């Protein structure tokens, strides 16, 4: 199974808190990114975040539409995100939404992860093209 790797930058991070109460704050965040590496292009993402009142404890889930190229093949697809952070450790995973690929990426499926190293973001995506 091929693996795509590279980096991305956060171009915008627009949070909107919708529930702030004891225990956790819930927010909807709109994010735009620029990808470099085996994924080259841009994306828009909407995530729901939950941040606890304990430092470094948080979680999010959401969807991201990527537009660009994957190993030179042009198209779009949607990624489903799931992430948690606790005590300085984090797990950030994503899966390609089945049947969301377009153009030369029609039939793409796969999964991978994201690493946030003090604001420097890298990714990997193990994928197949149907």
Image (cartoon, helix red, strand yellow):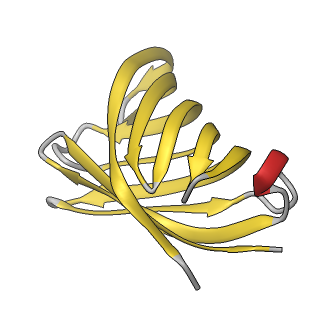
Res. 111 image quadrant = bottom right
Q: Tell me: residue 25, above or below residue 36.
A: above
Left or right of residue 9: residue 126: right
For the C terminus, the image quarter is: bottom right
How far across and how far down the image is residue 66, in percent?
Answer: 62, 40
Q: Is residue 101 visible?
A: no
Question: In this rendering, does residue 16 appear at all?
Answer: yes
Determine the residue positioned at 43% across, 17% down: 15
Q: Outermost residue toward the bottom? A: 1
Most foreground residue, 47 or 116: 116
Please tell me in which quadrant of the rendered image residue 52 appears. top left
- 129 vs 9, nearest the viewer: 129
Residue at screen point 42% across, 25% down = 21
Relative to residue 81, is residue 128 depicted above or below?
below
Residue ID at (82%, 62%): 98
Q: Nearer the viewer, residue 32 or 55?
A: 32
Looking at the picture, how far across and down is residue 62, in whole percent?
60, 42
Residue 91 point in image, percent of width and height:
36, 65
Taking the image as shown, residue 71 lies to the left or right of residue 123, namely right
* Residue 119 coordinates in the image, percent (x, y): 18, 39
| Image mark count | 0
Residue occupying the point 39% across, 17% down: 12
Outermost residue toward the front in this view: 72
Query: In terms of image quadrants, where is residue 53?
Result: top left
Q: Describe residue 57's horizontal placement relative to residue 41 as left or right.
A: left
Q: Which quadrant does the N terminus fall into?
A: bottom right
């Amino acid at each position: 199974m091929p693996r795509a790797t590279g980096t991305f930058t956060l171009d915008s991070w627009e949070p909107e808190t919708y529930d702030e109460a004891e225990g956790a704050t819930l927010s909807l965040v709109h994010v735009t990114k620029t990808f470099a590496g085996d994924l080259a292009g841009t994306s828009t993402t909407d995530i729901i975040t939950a941040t606890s009142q304990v430092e470094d404890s948080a979680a999010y889930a959401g969807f991201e539409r990527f537009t660009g190229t994957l190993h030179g093949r042009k198209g779009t697809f949607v990624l489903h995100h799931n992430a948690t952070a606790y005590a300085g450790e984090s797990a950030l995973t994503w899966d390609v939404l089945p049947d969301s690929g377009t153009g030369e990426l029609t039939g793409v499926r796969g999964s991978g992860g994201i690493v946030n190293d003090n604001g420097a973001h890298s990714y990997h995506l193990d994928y197949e093209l149907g």
